[in-house]
Image (cartoon, helix red, strand yellow):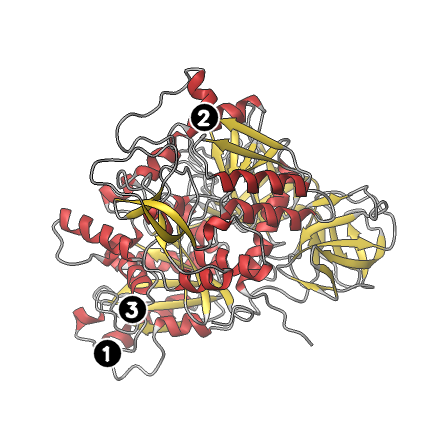
């Protein structure tokens, strides 16, 4: 394995037990030899207790007590596996409608989404819902797995039919990259190993797609944005005048001597050096964590953003966003919430709900102005101080926000800036 | 022109540094939970990177069961001195003396569960609002559902069904007085990642992780080290074996494995061919299928 080159790919799988989602994850882990003997033993024991023959692959993903008892996933669970080519993080999310919030959570950091379709049923409401969320969260790559091909006699015709159904409804959505794979998670066809039962399929098995899909362009490397997390002032021998701005490059590339502007103040300076504990760098790009020093003494604190002078984000207090409501408490009209955008925290008011989207039909409802758990709505926000934003479509890191209810401190909504 | 993507170890490092800086920015009085194990050593190493050239802005907090490997304590004290850090020790023995907890009885008695009370008492006493831990999601099924910022109520309890959603890199550490958070900067690392990184960065770890000769007793399939706390059962025999430890906890419950891996390179290689999870040698997790979940709900690490 080449550790110095191998990348990290995060993907999400949305679906219910019925689609074979847990079986698929179990199969990926099992066939890529990512499951340890004591885990297999534990699952064998539980499988026996439940009266299953052999190993029930789905049980490798069982988590909490309630989930095992009810055979469902309640919360996002993270799984890990590594192949000689990449490290993978799976955000395993439940597919039921009441768990939209978990799907959104899992999708927010994913490079790829696996959407499972049962070959016997074709595209159903749930497929449309999952695809909508993948598109809303701008997951760069979508892999549609048409599962349970063994139950439809590995029929090419059925596969083609489902592909056209998917093409048809998804043409309404903003999706960058879709690919289709006919699989049987239960029997292992086209998951890790190529299937001998579907010679008509010319593409790669799922794992090969995951190992090779191009992800280094998934992060915006054009618009240089550096949200300041904290200021480093060591005030000790050798570093008396050191004033470093610590943060993680949100997007783009920074180099020493770059002309920069500090927002929201608008002061300009140039980058003096880019520091890490292992030495100074010639350049820093997203998602690197570094500390930046500037040529001039400027008052900069957490929440400010360092950007290249020739390429600046919007600085605005009126923010249009698609908002997903995550909390059981409904939004209160014109109530104020804390809003978090990069390292910048301000207050915001929901001024207007423009429309709510029916995520099964994609229809817009302009009558219903309520924001309830799992609702996805277009809203207008007004913030107390300016945010430095980009469109979410261009930049996930500087285009995303969360709202926090200051009475409960809970995260109540997630938003994508338009 | 160079490449503009990170390899996965660099990405994990960058993510952990980001989280440590968020902890510093969002909390008043955070500490690193330091057990002397490799994961807490890694977190401390990452904290050094996150705040360079400043000192680590967190105290190290050790929950001392009194049943330690002497090597661990020596390692802890050396590291604290080297970093010029503050050390807070919560003592399980004191909790027992004060009657806050009672020692378990029986053959497999350990002080593992007793740590919860000492941990929560120490957090309260020092008004700690965030305890940074080396927990990883790959360790155990209940940990797979942890957040980077994990909320604990004023009883220190974890409610897995009512966690704050974590989207993108936006972390919400807001809390009321008396509540605290646990933060897990290396959530996304696996055991293999930890070893590869320790090897790459040449991080100092206690010699217990490398193969060495030691007196041990075979118990439930693991080699339990001989110590003053070990009560020998009938039919049990003390043997000398070349072993190493995959995890370090209380000396009474941490089992070693037979191994010849006496360098970091050999350990990393051995781990990559392991067919058992690292907690498989921890008798605390073997008690029931939901042993970890139950302890976590109560406020465990």
Task: Give the mark, 1 or 3, whose residue is nearer the N terminus.
Answer: 3
Nearest the viewer among A83 and A350 is A83
Marks 3 and 2: CB-CB under 8 Å? no
Q: CA distance from mark 1 to mark 2?
A: 67 Å
Q: Label for residue A157?
A: 1
Q: How dense is the environment of label 2, judged by Cα within 10 Å: few (below 14), some, or many (20 and up)?
A: many
**Secondary structure of residue under mark 1:** helix
Point out which mark residue B186 bears: none
- The answer to whether residue A73 is seen in the rendering is no
On whether disc 3 and disc 2 are found on a single subunit, the reply is no
Residue topped by disc 3 = A146
- Looking at the rendered image, the disc whose residue lies closer to the viewer, 3 or 2, is 2
User: Which x, y percent locates residue A8?
Assistant: 50, 64
A142 to A40, vertically: above or below: below
The label number, if any, that marks residue B92 in the structure image? 2
Q: Nearer the viewer, residue A44 or B72?
A: B72
Q: CA distance from mark 3 to mark 2?
A: 55 Å
The answer to which image quadrant residue B29 occupies is top right
Chain holding disc 1: A
What residue lies at 55% left-to-right and 29% top-to-bottom? Answer: B89
Identify the residue shown where x is 30% and y is 58%.
A21
Q: Is residue B204 above or below residue B161?
A: below
Label 3 Cα neighbours within 10 Å, binned few <14 / some 14-19 / many ≥20: many
- Which chain is disc 2 placed on? B
Give the percent coordinates (x, y) of residue A82. Answer: 42, 64
């Amino acid at each position: 394995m080449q550790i110095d080159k191998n990348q990290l790919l995060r993907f999400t799988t949305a679906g219910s037990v019925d689609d074979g989602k847990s079986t698929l994850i179990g199969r990926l882990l099992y066939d890529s030899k990512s499951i340890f003997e004591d885990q297999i033993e534990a699952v064998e024991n539980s499988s026996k207790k439940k009266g299953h023959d052999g190993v029930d692959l789905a049980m490798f993903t069982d988590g909490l007590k309630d989930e095992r008892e009810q055979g469902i996933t309640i919360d996002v669970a993270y799984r890990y596996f590594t192949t000689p080519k990449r490290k993978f993080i799976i955000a395993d999310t439940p597919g039921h409608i009441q768990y939209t919030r978990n799907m959104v959570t899992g999708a927010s950091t994913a490079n790829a989404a696996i959407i499972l379709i049962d070959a016997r049923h074709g595209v159903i409401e749930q497929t449309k819902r999952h695809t909508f969320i993948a598109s809303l969260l701008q997951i760069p790559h979508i892999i549609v797995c048409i599962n349970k091909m063994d139950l439809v006699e590995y029929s090419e015709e059925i596969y083609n039919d489902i592909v056209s159904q998917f093409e048809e409804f998804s043409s309404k959505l903003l999706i960058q990259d879709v690919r289709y794979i006919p699989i049987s998670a239960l029997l292992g066809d086209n998951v890790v190993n190529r299937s001998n039962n579907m010679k008509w399929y010319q593409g790669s098995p799922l794992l090969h797609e995951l190992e090779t899909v191009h992800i280094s362009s998934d992060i915006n490397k054009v618009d240089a944005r550096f949200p300041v997390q904290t200021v480093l002032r060591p005030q000790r021998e050798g570093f008396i005048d050191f004033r470093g701005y610590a943060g993680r490059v949100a997007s783009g590339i920074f180099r020493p001597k770059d002309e920069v502007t500090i927002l929201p103040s608008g002061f300009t300076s140039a980058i003096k050096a880019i520091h890490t504990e292992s030495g100074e760098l010639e350049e820093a790009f997203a998602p690197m964590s570094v500390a930046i020093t500037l040529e001039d003494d400027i008052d900069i604190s957490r929440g400010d953003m360092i950007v290249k002078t020739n390429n600046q984000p919007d600085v605005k207090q009126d923010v249009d966003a698609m908002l997903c409501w995550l909390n059981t408490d409904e939004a209160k009209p014109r109530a104020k919430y804390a809003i978090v955008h990069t390292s910048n925290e301000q207050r915001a008011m929901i001024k207007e709900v423009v429309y709510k989207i029916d995520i099964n039909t994609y229809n817009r409802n302009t009558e219903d102005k309520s924001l309830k758990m799992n609702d996805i709505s277009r809203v207008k926000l007004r913030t107390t101080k300016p945010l430095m934003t980009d469109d979410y479509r261009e930049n996930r890191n500087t285009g995303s926000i969360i709202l926090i209810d200051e009475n409960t401190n809970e995260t109540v909504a997630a938003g994508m800036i338009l | 022109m160079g490449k503009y993507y990170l390899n996965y170890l660099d990405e994990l490092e960058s993510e952990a540094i980001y989280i440590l800086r968020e902890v510093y920015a969002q909390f008043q009085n955070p500490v690193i939970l330091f057990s002397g194990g490799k994961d807490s050593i890694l977190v401390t190493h990452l904290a050094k990177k996150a705040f360079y050239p400043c000192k680590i802005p967190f105290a190290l907090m050790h929950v001392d069961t009194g049943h330690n490997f002497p090597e661990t304590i020596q390692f802890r004290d050396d590291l604290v001195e080297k970093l010029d850090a503050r050390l807070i020790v919560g003592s399980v023995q004191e909790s027992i003396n004060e009657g806050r907890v009672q020692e378990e009885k029986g053959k497999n008695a350990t002080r593992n569960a007793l740590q919860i009370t000492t941990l929560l008492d120490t957090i309260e006493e020092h008004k700690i609002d965030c305890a940074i831990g080396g927990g990883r999601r790959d360790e155990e099924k209940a940990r797979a559902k942890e957040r980077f910022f994990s909320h604990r109520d004023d009883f220190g309890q974890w409610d897995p069904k009512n966690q704050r959603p974590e989207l993108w890199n936006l972390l919400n550490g807001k809390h009321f007085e008396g509540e605290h958070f646990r933060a897990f900067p290396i959530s996304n690392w696996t055991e293999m990642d930890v070893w590869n990184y320790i090897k790459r960065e040449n991080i100092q770890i206690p010699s217990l992780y490398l193969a060495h000769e030691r007196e041990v007793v075979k118990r439930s399939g693991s080699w339990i080290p001989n110590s003053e706390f070990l009560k020998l059962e009938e039919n049990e025999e003390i043997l000398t074996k070349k072993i190493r430890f995959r995890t370090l906890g209380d000396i009474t419950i941490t089992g070693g494995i037979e191994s010849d891996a006496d360098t970091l390179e050999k350990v990393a290689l051995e781990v990559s061919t392991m067919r058992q999870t690292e907690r498989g040698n921890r008798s605390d997790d073997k008690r029931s299928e939901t042993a970890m979940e139950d302890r976590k709900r109560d406020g465990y690490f």
